[in-house]
Amino acid sequence: MPASAHRARRRPRGAAPLLAAGAAILFATGLGPAQAGAPPAYLDPRAETDRRVEDLMARMSLEDKLGQMVQIERAAADPAAVAEHRLGSVLSAGGSGPEPNTPEAWADMYDAYQRAALDTPLGIPILYGVDAVHGHNNVHGATIFPHNIGLGAAGDPELVRRVAEATAVEVAATGIDWNFAPCVCVVRDDRWGRSYESFGETPALPSAMTTAVDGYQGARLGGGAASVMATAKHYLGDGATEDGTDRGDVRVDEEELRAVHLPPFREAVRRGVASVMVSYSSWNGVKAHADRYLITDVLKGELGFDGVVVSDFDGVGRISGGRDFTAEELTTAVNAGMDMVMLSKGHDRFVTDLAGEVAAGRVPVARIDDAVRRILTAKVDMGLFEAPFARRDLLPEVGGEEHRALAREAAAASQVLLKNDGGLLPLAPGGGPLLVAGKNADDIGNQSGGWTITWQGGSGDITEGTSILEGIRAAAPDTEVVYDRHAEDTDGPYRAAVAVVGETPYAEGYGDRPEGVVLDEEDTATLTRLAESGLPLVVVVVSGRPVDVADHIGAWDALVAAWLPGSEGAGVADVLFGAVPPTGRLPVSWPRSAEQQPVNEGDGQSPLFAPGFGLTY
Ligand code: GLC
């Protein structure tokens, strides 16, 4: 089924503006645009999308068109500026949101931008984009789902669709209509700081989990209880850079690039994904943002992608190594096939610079028209002209019980049991006292990871949810559970100890670990004390990727990879106490040591645990 077949009308999202409402009434009475005073055809909700887009484009100046190609960060342009420059889109970069950080304040912010955009001569609504990569994660109180690597371990495409569907509801409640997710990258080196954004190290899992596109958009763009544009990212090969360096160089031949990294995008396009985001990385020295072959010939030509190709944040300005774009970089990117340019600032200069490039004949008008046609098609298909405002009726579902139950289910399904000597797990709900230790036992921020409330995430009670310790206490209400973060007093009639250790939050390059991913000193000291205590020991690793544990695991009776479970830590406890049996399987190779990195299935190396490994009860 061609991608365009997935495009259809969006379910009404809220109160329509006066002009569009008037148009809808007129058209409903059978009066078409031919009648004097009738609103323009592009506002006719009954007309075919192509007809509406062509009618609108015929009314647009070159400056109107160029403005549509800009996606500006909210901090650089208030609603008046967005309207003045006729900008097509606004985004919230990681953690960029209103104060107070509440769902209602997000809806107010979105509606203010939308009202300003509609109050212009052509009244073209904006698209507003965010990274809701594991729930509406910028918003305090929103449900935080497991990051992709945990969902890859769960291995359930329908679960991923349900998680995305719930996320779309929370996103649409705040008005946002464009989600920069799912990341369908194939992580080939866990030293990469974005490993947790990948569903797995081979194309099979990321391809299977493109069900997220259906979850975000509905069965087609505009379907579902709430439909937001999905984004397959980052095109192409971002998970295969040398040494796992974020935004680095992918040094593979075309055969490997096509075999390993292209399949998830092919599948996302087949599902009608509305946008594709280009990667900061390079392929054999050519910046993806400048790569006409990959963007136009392969993605748009061979794969038939007819949606919007969007740059990464200031990705165009980084083509030549700086950050602020030049007219030459704009020309290179737009001629390569970039339709929308994501900017931290410079929206005003964008229009004048690109207009100059068009006037000089360096960017064909036909390329501009193709880009704008794609952008306007998305806006019409989303139904934004008819119902542009936040779905405030959905606000009660943001962080609601139903979504938190789903997040708990997903967290439990993502747990991978790697060791269980003597059947120590599952723990009995009743019996003698339990000792819980480790810095990640009672820390919602650490169990959520990066891209949570802020771009990098952070430790502590950063949002609402249940810590793993709180989950343990709830699972064993009649058991004395003692929390001793560093296990400084192990003397006691404990029947077992549970140590929850691992990584603290990071995002993108800040998570690069070129020397390998190891336990920090705090965790190592805690684990050493526990090993010396002789207590039966369960270790739970909360991390965005495998951690080098080979030298320690011999002293542990049981080991669970919890990944980054999100706000519902009770899902981890469900598995520890057997309410839910462990069913997760490794989505990536677990290295025997950092020296093995990169280690992947079929590379002839012998990891500590192979992909697909996982025990159960
Ligand atoms: C970031 C990321 C990308 C994200 C974008 C907007 O740098 O690379 O995944 O969607 O900027 O926040």
Image: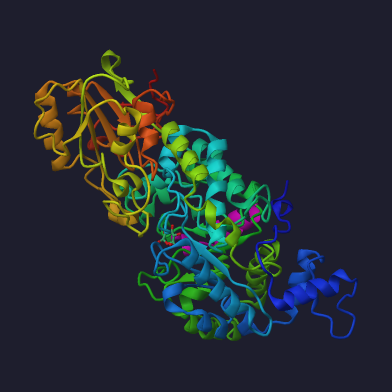
The image quarter in which residue 588 lies:
top left
Q: Which residues are magenta?
A: 287-303
Which residue appears farthest toward the front when viewing the image?
A: 478
For the stretch drawn in magenta, the main secondary structure is helix
Up-down relation of residue 307 to residue 604 (above or below): below
Query: Residue 538: percent from the left, percent from the top?
Result: 25, 26
Front one among 70 and 97: 97
Residue found 46% across the figure and 38% down from its top: 151
Up-down relation of residue 212 to residue 288 (above or below): above
Residue 295 part of the magenta-drawn span = yes
The image quarter in which residue 158 lies:
top right
Query: Residue 109: percent from the left, percent from the top?
Result: 50, 71
Whether residue 293 is visible, yes or no, is no
Q: How is the image coloured?
A: rainbow
Indicate which quadrant contains ligand 1. bottom left
Front one among 563 and 576: 576
The image quarter in which residue 573 lies:
top left
Residue found 57% across the figure and 70% down from its top: 335
Q: Is residue 454 left or right of residue 460?
A: right
Q: Is residue 600 left or right of residue 259?
A: left
Up-down relation of residue 172 to residue 190 (above or below): below
Which residue appears farthest toward the top when viewing the image?
A: 422
Residue found 44% across the figure and 80% down from its top: 346
Whether residue 132 is visible, yes or no, is yes
Query: Residue 61: percent from the left, percent from the top?
Result: 67, 85
Residue 327 part of the magenta-drawn span = no
Front one among 104 and 576: 104
Query: Residue 198: percent from the left, percent from the top?
Result: 43, 44
Q: Quadrant of the C terminus?
A: top left
Q: Is residue 151 left or right of residue 296?
A: left
Front one among 586 and 369: 586
